[in-house]
Amino acid sequence: MSASPDPLATLRGVCEEKLPAWIRDAPKGSTIGVACSYAPLELLHAAGLLPVRLRCPGPPPADSDTWLPPFTCSVVRGLLGMAVDGSLVDLAAVLLPHTCDSMQELAGICRLVAPGVEVFTFVEPLAVESPYAQAYLQQELRGLADRLRERLGRRITDEGLRESLALYNRIRQARARIDGLRNRLPALDAWAALAAAWLLPPEDYLEAAEQLANTLQDAEPRMGDRPRLLLAGSVIDEPLIPALIDELGGQVVGDDLCNGMRDADTLASESGDPWTALAVRLLRRGACPAKHAPSRPLGQRLADLAARTRAQGVVQVMVKFCDPHAFEVVPATQTLSSAGCPQLLLEVEAGSGRGQVRTRLQAFLELVSGGP
Amino acid sequence: MGRYARLESALELGRLMERHYAEALDRRHLRPVAWVNAGAPVELLRAMDVLAVYPENYAAMCGVRGALWLCEVAEGAGYSRDLCSYARISLGASLSGPSAPYEGLGRPDLLICCNNSCGTIVKWFEALGRLFEAPLFVIDTPYVHDGLPGHAAAYVAAQLQELIHWLERVAARRLHPGALEEALRLSREVTLLWREIRSYCRTRPSPLNAPDLFTHMAPIVVLRGTAEAVAYYRRLRDEVRQRAQRGVGAIPNERYRLLWDNIAIWSHLSRFYYLFAAHGACFVTDTYTGAWDAVPEEGDPIESLARVYTTIYLNRSLRFRLGQMEQLMQDYACDGFVMHNNRSCKAFSLGQPSARRRLADATGAPGLLLEADMCDTRAYAEGQVRARVEAFLETLAGRAG
């Protein structure tokens, strides 16, 4: 597909589809679904695949209730639901990284109950600061490349990987530009413009994102003195929260979201061995709460980001039953409190109603802006 | 029904655990105290004379006594009610000081954990590290989807070497030549004894029932790699073997033989399993106490530790675990199985609904999936549990004719 004359329409449009329509038109066997931001997109792209993040807006399909306990997060329920209801039939395969206990179990369950789905696993390190993590991860990346060759006939060359690293670096730079120009965009548009990076073919996203960034560069700031919020937490697959922030008169000045800016702060080196460069990027990127990264606690990252963006409050969005976040949110809350930063914790599930979220966001916006 | 046959070794078990906890709680800390998880390679600590103390075991003991209030203390400190109840009990007890059961678990000098059981353990130990301002070492054991890749074994081995240096630095201990080999030898022996003890349950009637296994697994968790554990399990082995030889069953009138999957329901250890025992249903094997069944290989001790701790039951794929359950059902001639769908343990529980169907299809035996929690009594609905257990037992009775 090619970018539309209105790049924002392209970026918003793909976020409105549960599974992007372009997948149906893509060459057979060329697309791969990924379930988490630790998926090595560059490697997949170098293998000639188009990675697309699988997202789960709306209530999980009823089928998933048959196969999962009720205390499973809506992300995993949604993913399994798509695997069993045939939604993934146009994909060559699905890659499930090992980010948390639920994601790791999902791979085994998928193989049992949806044998038609070609599942690849990728066990990235948990101890991302271990001095031995890099050597392990490089081997794990090589192992994934071998499996892609064996099972999908896809070969990766060093040169191809280097080119993909450069492409995704440009994408991260384009995302950073949009992130830095948020005062020209409503929260909903900014969310879509960044989330679309996971949903469009990378070349198409880059074109649209750079076009949008250029347009924004020339535009005047338009968010004025709306209360400034930082949006943090798990993945946000639905537009509900950013849309409500717009509706209630707030603005989002930065994010630390799984499908937002969390992974965008680290570019891969474009010189030297590309496998090393990819491993280093994955280890140094903003750590997911599921990781053990003692020198980079989430709370400090949020406090620093809040200070840098002059946020007046932090909204932490936690997907229910996301254990890593539920643990991490405790010290993060303490750190933010010590930094004098007001915060709101929203526990959500895909498809959860807007009423309570709206009320709590409204009260929080009133709090940070000094009352109604 | 007749009287539940109590093991004579239980008295010695009590004494053994008392001695262990007396040292753990000795405020003088005659040697460094490391809080570790059940999947940590404790043999290294034995070899470096560091006392290993297990918050998981402590949480289970609290769970037996009733530990809802400790969960609530942790929840009051911001930890979600949806989190693992062991973690909440441990954090609640740590926040409660000596008012916690058994006057609490004291303070750790250091913390060591390994994610071969789950990722939750790492977040829990990170929280303990912050609470006690104690240094934490995390051993990252990559999940084994298919076979154990060489680079994963090498990664774990490298971390174990690093752990030795870390203990030298943080705990001022040295690894004495031969000490690790000796700890591994003891570990090997105790694991083989535990395997032998469990294997006697293949006899009919089974000399042990799940609550026996759950209770008597404590030393293999907290004293693995020690001579005390070996001595204890030799004694238990003799008693269980004698029972098997004499045809003494754990429960009177064994009619149905069952497999148990997942962690015990500690809060209802007697009452819940009595529901089954009262109808002649005995849990003759299980996946929980079997997790300590892996024998460290001979050869390079670090490589051996890396392999055995990376390939433990919960760090293996669902397909592997399903295969293990099928094998257990066959080896122990089980008539059915019960899966505790444990809200606290996603690693054990998420795959159970799909595994239940597969296991029932593969074995032709009925299976009960029961949602509860290992310690949080709010997740245990007494009436509902009773009704479902009775319906399951009726199914078993119907099949038995």
Image (tube, coloured by chain):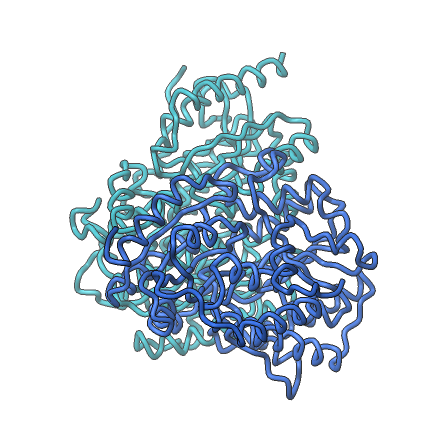
Q: Position of residue A170 (x, y in %)?
A: 62, 77
Residue nearer the viewer, B18 or B158: B158
Left or right relative to B27: residue A82: right
For image coordinates 43% across by 77% down, the residue present is: B177
Q: Closer to the camera, B286 or B76?
A: B76
x and y, in percent, of residue A42 in the image: 67, 71
Residue A335 is left or right of residue B116, and the answer is left
Identify the residue shown where x is 35% and y is 52%: A345
Q: Give x and y (percent) for residue A2.
A: 75, 65
Instruction: Tell me if A221 is positioned left or right of A1 in this view.
Output: left
Q: Pick the residue in front: B73 or B235.
A: B73
Chain that is blue in the image: A
Chain letter, colour cyan in render: B
- Residue furthest to the top in view is B401
How many numbered tags mark residues here?
Answer: 0
Observer able to see residue B51: no
The residue depicted at 59 percent of the width and 68 percent of the height is B153
Residue A270, position in %: x, y?
64, 84
**Relative vertical location of residue A32 with respect to residue A244 in this rendering, above or below:** below
- Residue B182, compared with residue B355, is above or below; it is below
Could one spot residue B115 in this view of the protein? yes
* Position of the N terminus of chain A by quadrant: bottom right
Say which quarter of the image contains residue A86.
top right
